[in-house]
Amino acid sequence: MPECGLLVSAPGKVILHGEHAVVHGKAALAVALGLRTFLRLRPGGGERLRIHLPGVGVRREWDVAELRALRGRLTGGANSPSVEQLDTLKEFAGIAADASAPDSLAILAFLYMCLAISAKYGDVPSVDITVWSELPTGAGLGSSAAYAVCLAAALLHACGAISCPLKDGEATARWTEEEMTLINSWAFQGERVIHGNPSGVDNAVGTWGGALRYQSGKITSLKRVPMLRILLTNTKVPRSTKVLVAGVKEKILKFPAIMNPVLDSIDAISQECQSVLEAMPTNPSPEYYPVLEELFDINQHHLNVIGVGHPSLDRLCRVTASHGLHSKLTGAGGGGCGITLLPPDATPLAVEAAKRDLCACGYECWETDIGAPGVTLHSSSSLNAQVLHALSES
Ligand SMILES: Nc1ncnc2c1ncn2[C@@H]1O[C@H](COP(=O)(O)OP(=O)(O)OP(=O)(O)O)[C@@H](O)[C@H]1O
Ligand SMILES: C[C@@](O)(CCO)CC(=O)[O-]
Ligand SMILES: [Mg+2]
């Protein structure tokens, strides 16, 4: 265990194309966002393990000896969380069998990852863990994956399975490729607890950052990523990724001949978009945008067809279209966030007017950087004093 503790962060993500289809083996294009989740781990006192998750209103602590005994009861499910294991954890933590509330899922993912990682690499650590985020929770921006990536990195580090890459005087550092692969694989298990059947794209972006193509576990960095300006809009309509993913599966099983061609078409959209992005110069001229905009429009229709649209997202698309801008949902849909492409020739007046109209719908919108770095270790001194203050208040 590091004497002074550690601070890690992981980015959220935006899926440009391929959400849901990626769960069924198709390609997705995703980019890391400039909004991050942070985790601070400090040596604990009195053989206790404490977690504080202000984003979901959780403050819990357990006896390390009690967790060791619980770990001994978690048999089976060697490589992924089994139903029996999760039932045992729910009973231990006092979580209802069918609980899907954010706090319950966050505790469950934490307990599973902590016990499974410590069973493989070391003892249950006596630590205090606090996680907070700049990402809205459950809005399509990969908050669950950023949470799982931070937990994986911190717990693997606490159990001695990965190194401390931070050198004296450095503000940030990244782990080796091999260590990141390990972090990513454990984050995927955490995502499984929260999502049920994740594709792995979100935790891949949270781990590796940048812009990537993801298909059936294969991660490829995009050759070149132009400076895309994207407006993010949160409709604030709550939804659960797990429920939406399960709904799509049901539809595919019910209408395979109708739904599978839609998934194939989404796959082709991802391919086409990747070709355009890789052909674009870093500072692209407006001529490339009509194709990207048309691909947004087509995919948004497809996502409605597979049942993950929402009236709030239709409204978002209509509002931006009235200002000549093109949008689609991002992430699991059913509410949550949409993305709007801002071409270089969009006038500041049109963008401001679109933002004003979106806010008038009760939505929140903001522009953010894309292609941010993946999971990162920070020196504690690099932590913004204000954030620390906010945390001590929460
Ligand atoms: N900062 C956080 N602290 C604790 N738990 C979190 C945090 N952020 C997310 N979670 C967990 O992740 C869940 C949200 O995951 P969900 O997959 O439904 O949404 P998302 O990841 O934000 O969107 P998407 O998967 O569509 O990108 C929350 O209910 C909570 O259990
Ligand atoms: C909806 C989905 O495709 C993306 C959620 O961000 C689910 C997944 O890939 O696990
Ligand atoms: Mg998620």
Image: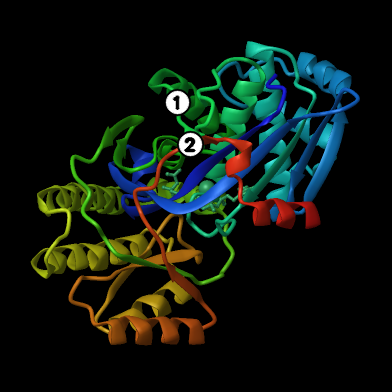
Residue beneath the point at 68% across and 14% down: 119
Q: Residue furthest front?
A: 169
Amino acid type indicated by mark 2: Val
Q: Is residue 294 above or below residue 360?
A: above
Image location (x, y in percent) of residue 291: 13, 64
User: Tag 2: Cα neighbours inside 10 Å, few (<14), some, or many (≥20)?
Assistant: many
**Residue beneath disc 1:** 180
Q: Is residue 274 above or below residue 4?
A: below
Residue 40 falls left or right of residue 195? right
Residue beneath the point at 46% across and 64% down: 337
Residue beneath the point at 28% across and 47% down: 260
Mark 2 element type:
loop
Number of the label disc, if any, that sits on residue 316: none
Q: Are marks 1 and 2 in contact (CB under 8 Å)?
A: yes
**Observer-nearest of 64 and 174:** 174
| One can see residue 343 in this view | yes
User: Tag 1: Cα neighbours inside 10 Å, few (<14), some, or many (≥20)?
Assistant: many
Image location (x, y in percent) of residue 213: 28, 40
Amino acid type indicated by mark 1: Met
Give the alpha-carbon distance from disc 1 to disc 2, as whole Å.
8 Å
**Observer-nearest of 125 and 269:** 125
**Residue beneath disc 2:** 375
